[in-house]
Image (cartoon, rainbow, N blue to C red):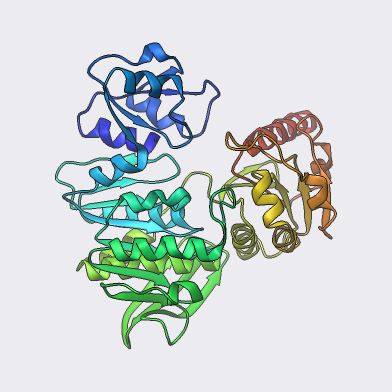
């Protein structure tokens, strides 16, 4: 929603919004743009407004209810997004995991080459005059991405998530099949995903990956403590070497997708190479900071596949350091549905700490707890509270990853404050 507000502001619209009063990381860009943020109140709604409602809120929300009673035009977020992308070469980035990172990378690359509007799931959004491209994150939750019909679609994977909505992995696949049916020019899909390989479409599907069966193949891959480099081969033709200052195998795949879609829009390969080298990442995706001699990584990972990818990235950048994870399970339904997979992925760390489960507005309780997950973890599994982060002080010159999609950052801040205070005392 904040990304959409920023684009509309850049397009010259007068924008205001209602939100919770607790500070969130997507808020800063709105403040810098001078967009008014109001506490929720039905009195915020008045004549002359077009109302765009976030998908977290039902039609019973007082502001949405009043807007409808007044006869104002009301759109849901995904419905309005479907309107916004028209008239540009649109590229929707979809997948259970990797959407935000790939959208951010593609936005960065194309923005350095041609006027590009973009909407990223970390709250970043931009609208520019006479944009050639519109890059957006296409979210599969509740099939919201089906409100859009992009020119190109990137599909990073199909995985079972959102068990509060999807009945099964087959149900997820049907949503992606429909999205494929709605794509206008071409689809770029990760070649290792068996379910993506089963998709049919009226437009060409190009697969990317590390194998000879992929249309866009990364060869001669080098992963170092400063990033990753690889040659890209398209159907036997060497397109040259590309480098990214990113870690983890998943970021090689993300980069391949970006190279592939850019190639089909006749973007100069040398310009792609140059832009890839300067990408600094997106918010809450492997965001690093150092306090004293500790490395702290903040990451949005909240699914077993994402946890595995994040730990893999940390191992690449810090091969000789101990890696501890502080994980906040996100929603009761996801925790109980993927319990064994969570344990397996978390055990890739050297030690695991858990917080209590974060309940979303959709779920306030459930028949599972963090203690249930802890029993399945062999690499620790202690439960941390924000009041006592002292177990983390046993680490020295190590890496701690805070992972989750809820309010894990409050635990992170408590630890950082503690670390800074002790560091000042010692010094």
Q: Which sits in the foreground, 58 or 50?
A: 58
Q: Which sits in the foreground, 47 or 395?
A: 47
Query: Image quadrant of residue 36?
Result: top left
Q: Which sits in the foreground, 227 or 61?
A: 61
The residue depicted at 57 percent of the width and 61 percent of the height is 168
Q: Is residue 398 left or right of residue 371?
A: left
As drawn, the residue found furthest toward the front would be: 69
Residue 51 is situated, as x and y percent measured from the top left of the image, at 31, 27
Query: Image quadrant of residue 420?
Result: top right
Residue 166 is situated, as x and y percent measured from the top left of the image, at 54, 54
Count up the numbered dots: 0
Q: Is residue 193 visible?
A: no
The residue depicted at 47 percent of the width and 50 percent of the height is 141
Query: Image quadrant of residue 248?
Result: bottom right
Q: Quadrant of the C terminus?
A: top right
The residue depicted at 33 percent of the width and 19 percent of the height is 69
Q: Is residue 162 left or right of residue 10?
A: right
Q: Quadrant of the N terminus?
A: top left
Q: Is residue 196 above or below residue 233?
A: above
Residue 347 is situated, as x and y percent measured from the top left of the image, at 76, 61
Residue 252 is situated, as x and y percent measured from the top left of the image, at 47, 68
Q: Is residue 302 above or below residue 173?
A: above
As drawn, the residue found furthest toward the top would be: 43
Q: Is residue 326 visible?
A: yes
């Amino acid at each position: 929603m904040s990304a959409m507000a920023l684009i509309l502001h850049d397009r010259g619209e007068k924008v205001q919004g209602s939100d919770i009063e607790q500070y969130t990381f997507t808020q800063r860009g709105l403040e810098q743009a001078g967009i008014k943020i109001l506490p929720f109140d039905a009195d915020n709604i008045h004549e002359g407004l077009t109302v765009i409602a976030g998908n977290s809120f039902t039609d019973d929300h007082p502001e949405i209810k009043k807007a409808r009673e007044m006869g104002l035009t009301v759109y849901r977020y995904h419905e309005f997004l479907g309107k916004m992308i028209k008239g540009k070469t649109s590229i929707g980035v979809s997948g259970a995991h990797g959407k935000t990172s790939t959208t951010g990378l593609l936005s960065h690359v194309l923005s350095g080459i041609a006027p590009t509007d973009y909407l990223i799931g970390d709250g970043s959004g931009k609208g520019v005059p006479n944009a050639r491209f519109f890059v957006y994150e296409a979210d599969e939750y509740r099939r919201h991405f089906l409100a859009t019909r992009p020119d190109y679609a990137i599909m990073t994977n199909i995985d079972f998530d959102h068990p509060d909505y999807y009945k099964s992995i087959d149900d997820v696949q049907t949503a992606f099949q429909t999205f494929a049916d709605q794509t206008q020019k071409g689809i770029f899909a990760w070649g290792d995903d068996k379910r993506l390989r089963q998709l049919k479409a009226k437009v060409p599907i190009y697969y990317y990956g590390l194998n000879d069966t992929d249309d866009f193949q990364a060869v001669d891959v080098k992963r170092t403590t400063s990033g990753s480099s690889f040659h890209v081969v398209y159907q036997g033709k060497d397109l040259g070497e590309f480098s990214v200052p990113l870690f983890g195998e998943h970021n090689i795949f993300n980069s391949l997708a970006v190279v592939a879609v850019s190639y089909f829009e006749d973007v100069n390969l040398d310009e792609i190479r140059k832009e890839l080298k300067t990408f600094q990442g997106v918010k809450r995706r492997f965001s690093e900071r150092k306090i004293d001699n500790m490395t702290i990584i903040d990451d949005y990972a909240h699914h077993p596949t994402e946890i595995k990818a994040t730990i893999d990235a940390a191992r690449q950048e810090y091969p000789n350091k101990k890696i501890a994870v502080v994980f906040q399970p996100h929603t009761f339904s996801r925790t109980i549905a993927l319990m064994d997979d969570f344990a397996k992925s978390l055990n890739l760390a050297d030690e695991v700490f858990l917080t209590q489960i974060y309940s979303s507005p959709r779920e306030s309780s459930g028949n599972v707890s963090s203690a249930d997950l802890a029993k399945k973890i062999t690499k620790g599994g202690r439960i941390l509270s924000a009041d006592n982060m002292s177990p983390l002080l046993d680490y020295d010159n190590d890496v701690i990853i805070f992972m989750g999609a809820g309010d894990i950052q409050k635990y992170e801040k408590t630890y950082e404050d503690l670390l800074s205070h002790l560091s000042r005392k010692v010094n």
